[in-house]
Structure formats: structure tokens, C-alpha cells
Amino acid sequence: MNDLYKYEKNLYQKGYNYIAGIDEVGRGPLIGPVVSAAVVLPKGFKLEGLTDSKKLSVKKRNTFFDIIKEQALGIGIGIINEKRIDEINIYQASKEAMKEALNNLTCEVDYVLIDALELDIDIPSYAIIKGDSKSISIAAASVIAKVTRDKMMEELDKKYPVYGFKNHKGYPTKKHLSALKKYGILNEHRLSYKPVYAILEEKNKIN
């Protein structure tokens, strides 16, 4: 069992008071933005069961989302759309989303814990592989980012119900790939992603 508070405790002991956890969600989907969240939790914050958002049920995620929103000292969101992802690639877009989330934070920050990626920023920082299951701050950020993006996909589902976005959230499931072939590419699809690009190529051959 990981001690989710280990990194934060260590930093508090070194004199840091405002520790931001940063995580992103949406690297794998074929459609929509990559979304990042930066969260600064108060000292002594406790939330039993909080971990990597992917390991939580929808109900649990939504409950934790509300608790984190209510108790966090600050939250910042970064959203990089599909056009920008196609332009600079998903790796760079993920970094851009993280920086944007940090810039949008509503409180002071003196240290940053990041899930996996290293960022070129002026604040002291540390990248943790699988940080969303090792740091309470990153776990909180993962929940905020995931629920935020899922809500965006649910809105997209209302606009294009035949694609089933509320169920697969834009990931390349059989249903999504089948709908892509049947109904075509949407403005919100990532054209640089292979399954989308392949359909585009096929269409261009026919034309």
C-alpha cells in the first residue's frame, strides 16, 4: 500500500507550504481535447480511497470531485483542443495543458508534483512516474481532470448521440471505430491519430 502523503509530508518538512499536484487526461481518445488539472490541497487534507481516477467508479469520482472542489486551496484547469494536438502532437499538448492548468491556479504555489512529465517551469518541481497513485495531490488533480473531460464528452454526446461518446469518452473502442466508419469524421476528431487518419485517407482515395 503506497503512502499517498509521503511526497507532500517530505516537502512540508522542507518548508514548502503550497504544493500543486498536476495530472492530465485524454491522451488516448480520438476526439476532443486533452485536459489537465492543477490542485493545491490544504495541509492535513484526508480523503479515504482517493487514488488514480481511472481506478475509481464514476460515482466515487464524482463524489471526490465535489469534495476536492470544496476543500482545495486552489484549482487550475488547462484545456488544449484537438486542432492544437494535431499541430504539435499529444505529448507536447499534454505539457501545454499542464502549464496552462498551473497558470490558471487560483492560489499561491511554491512546489509542483507532476504525473510522469517534466515541465520547463520556474517553480521547483518533481515528476513522479504513476504519480496519480503515489501522491495525494496528483491523485486529486487526476480526479478533477477526468471528471472535467468526461463532462465535456457527455456534452459532445448530446450533439452527436450516434457516436456513443458518453460511454467510451472518445477512446478507440469498437463502437467508436464503427461509428467513425459509418458516420464519418467530426470537426472535433484528432486528424493526426491513426484510426481517424486512415478513414480520411480512404475517403480521399474514393474521391
Image (spheres, grey):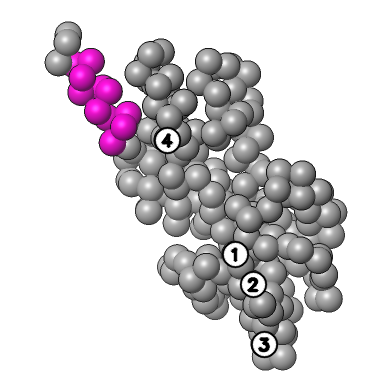
Q: Which three-letter amino acid code belongs to the residue tagged 4?
A: Pro
Mark 3–mark 2 Cα distance, whole angstroms, equals 11 Å
Q: Give the extent of the magenta segment.
A: 194-204
Q: Which three-letter amino acid code belongs to the residue tagged 3?
A: Asn
- The residue mark sitting in front, 3 or 2, is 2
Q: Is the residue under label 4 in contact with that under label 2 (CB below 8 Å)?
A: no
Quick one: label 4, few (<14), some, or many (20+) residues within 10 Å? some
11 versus 64 height, above or below? below
Judged by its main secondary structure, the magenta piece is: helix
Q: Is the residue under label 1 in contact with that under label 2 (CB below 8 Å)?
A: yes
Estimate the x, y position of residue 165 in percent, counting from the top left.
55, 27
Mark 2–mark 4 Cα distance, whole angstroms, equals 29 Å
Q: Is the residue under label 3 in contact with that under label 4 (CB below 8 Å)?
A: no
Residue, disc 3 = 10
Q: Is the residue under label 2 in contact with that under label 3 (CB below 8 Å)?
A: no
Mark 3–mark 1 Cα distance, whole angstroms, equals 17 Å
Residue, disc 2 = 135
The answer to whether residue 195 is magenta is yes
Mark 4–mark 1 Cα distance, whole angstroms, equals 23 Å
